[in-house]
Amino acid sequence: MMRTSNHSSWKKEYLRILNSDELMEKDWKLASELISDGYADGKVLRDSDSKTDEIHDLLWKGANTNGRLFADQLAERIRKSSLIYRVKAFMIGVAIWISGYLMKCDYLDLLFGIFK
């Protein structure tokens, strides 16, 4: 599958196409890749006169079961590559490390000693 210079833009493009009911002509190349890879149903009519193998027309029937699973995977990858997800994961790791450190130290008695 085609990848562009932006790390997640190709994922967003494939996800947008997989979730679309109708496509524009600019989406035909990516849609034909999804059809040929088995993620969507449809027909691709290539221009037989062209040496560049251009697409003359495309019948898009939508994502099939494999395509919906692939779309879920792409959405999860996009979510995990976001800055907010990474910051939350880092903060959870720091919180777990601090709690483990406090359990090992006598600071736990200092913090919660008033409840004894």
Image: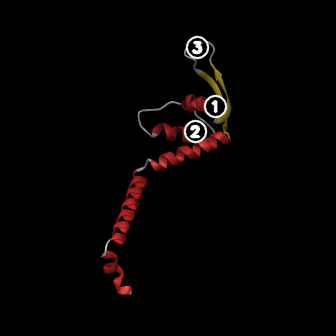
Asked whether the viewer can see residue 19, the reply is no
Nearer-the-camera pick, 52 or 1? 1
Estimate how packed mark 3 is, as few (under 14), some (14 to 19) or many (20 or more) residues with alpha carbons within 10 Å: few
Which residue is depicted at the point 36% across and 81% down?
112
Amino acid of disc 3: Ser
Q: Nearer the viewer, mark 3 or mark 1?
A: 1
Is label 1 in a helix, a strand or a loop?
helix
Report the side of 36 relative to 81 (left or right). right
Is label 2 in a helix, a strand or a loop?
helix
Q: Earlier in the sequence, mark 1 or mark 2?
A: 2
Which residue is depicted at the point 53% across and 47% down?
75
Q: Earlier in the sequence, mark 2 or mark 3?
A: 2
Is label 3 in a helix, a strand or a loop?
loop
Label 1 to label 2, Cα distance in Å?
11 Å
Q: Disc 2 marks which residue?
A: 17
Nearer-the-camera pick, 33 or 44? 33
Q: Which mark is residue 50?
A: 3
Estimate how packed mark 1 is, as few (under 14), some (14 to 19) or many (20 or more) residues with alpha carbons within 10 Å: many
Residue 16: x and y in percent read 55, 41
Estimate how packed mark 2 is, as few (under 14), some (14 to 19) or many (20 or more) residues with alpha carbons within 10 Å: many
Label 3 to label 1, Cα distance in Å?
21 Å
Label 2 to label 3, Cα distance in Å?
25 Å
Report the side of 84 relative to 107 (left or right). right
Q: Disc 1 marks which residue?
A: 35
Quarter assignment of residue 4? top left
Nearer-the-camera pick, 2 or 101? 101
Residue 82: x and y in percent read 43, 49
